[in-house]
Every structure is written in structure tokens, then in C-alpha cells.
Amino acid sequence: MNDSVARFAPHAFAILRIVVGVLFAMHGSQKLFGTPGDKPPVELASLMGVAGIIEFVGGLLIAVGFLTRPAAFLSSGTMAVAYFMAHGFQHPLPIINQGELAVVYCFVFLYIWAHGAGIWSLDSMLGRNRAAVAV
């Protein structure tokens, strides 16, 4: 890759981590608090309530880059379960069963788990992210 572009890879990854984390947290806040939007909150002691907690807390942790690897791993697994429980039985192709977002979240979080928090993260500030040191 062209070195003039490759030098921005850590920054692009940090922006990806932050944006995806915030968007995932918003899914959780919709389930837990009914906002943004006007959906009623779900029951906390339900499967959707547990998913909402994981989405909200996991998304915030990923966005700020704190405990990033465990949060990303748990979030990835949650999205895999969500896909197979809510979409996979309808049709095998995500484009047809409307499970694309769950699949994308699952694999983006799996990549974040493998990569680590990177720059602009609390993990790197605390010295807990070896990937940020190597950059």
C-alpha cells in the first residue's frame, strides 16, 4: 500500500472503532431507555433486555477504547446469537433475511477484538494495548 495512505490506517481504525461503538450503544439505549426514537423500553429481565445491556455498555466501552477486547468479543458473540435467533431461520442469506447489520457488527467486533483498541483509546493510554505501541 502507498505509504502516504498507510500512515493514516491507525487513525481510520480509531474512527471506525469509535463510530461503530457509538452506533452499537444506540441500539442498546433504544432497548433500555426507548431513545433515540420512540420505541418503548424492553423488560430488563428478558433476552432483549440482556442484549440491550450488552449493546449499550459494550458499545460505550468499545467507543472509548476501555476493556476493548473483552467488550468486542462479547459484542461479537451477541451479534452472532442475534443473527441466528432472529434472522437465520428465515433464509440462509443475510441480504434476504435482513440480518446484514448483525453479521457486519459481528465481524467488525471480531476484528476489533483481534486488533485491540488502537490509538485514541483509554486502553492505549493505560498501556494495555500492545497494538497501539507497535504503530
Image (spheres, rainbow, N blue to C red):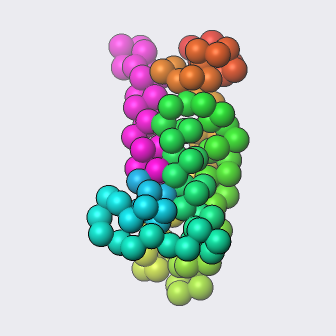
Q: Is residue 27 above or below residue 83?
A: above
Q: Is residue 7 above or below residue 35?
A: above
Q: Is residue 106 left or right of residue 37?
A: right
Of residues 40 and 58, the one drawn nearer to the viewer in this rendering = 40
Q: Is residue 4 left or right of residue 76?
A: left
Q: Quadrant of residue 36?
A: bottom left
Q: Most extreme residue toward the bottom, as rendered? A: 90
Of residues 116 and 127, the one drawn nearer to the viewer in this rendering = 127
Whether residue 84 is visible:
no
Of residues 27 and 72, the one drawn nearer to the viewer in this rendering = 27
Magenta segment, principal secondary structure?
A: helix
Q: Residue at x 64, y 71 (%)?
A: 45
Q: Position of residue 65 (x, y in %)?
A: 55, 30
Is residue 35 inside the magenta stretch?
no
Whether residue 28 is visible:
yes
Q: Position of residue 28 (x, y in %)?
A: 48, 58
Q: Position of residue 42 (x, y in %)?
A: 50, 73
Is residue 10 inside the magenta stretch?
yes
Q: Position of residue 50 (x, y in %)?
A: 63, 64
Q: Is residue 62 above or below residue 130?
A: below
Quarter of the image with the C terminus in it: top right
Q: Residue at x 42, y 23 (%)?
A: 11
Q: Most extreme residue toward the left, as rendered? A: 37
Q: Is residue 106 above or below residue 116?
A: below
Quarter of the image with the N terminus in it: top left
Q: Residue at x 40, y 19 (%)?
A: 8
Magenta residues, start to end: 1-25
Q: Quadrant of residue 122?
A: top right
Q: How many marks?
A: 0
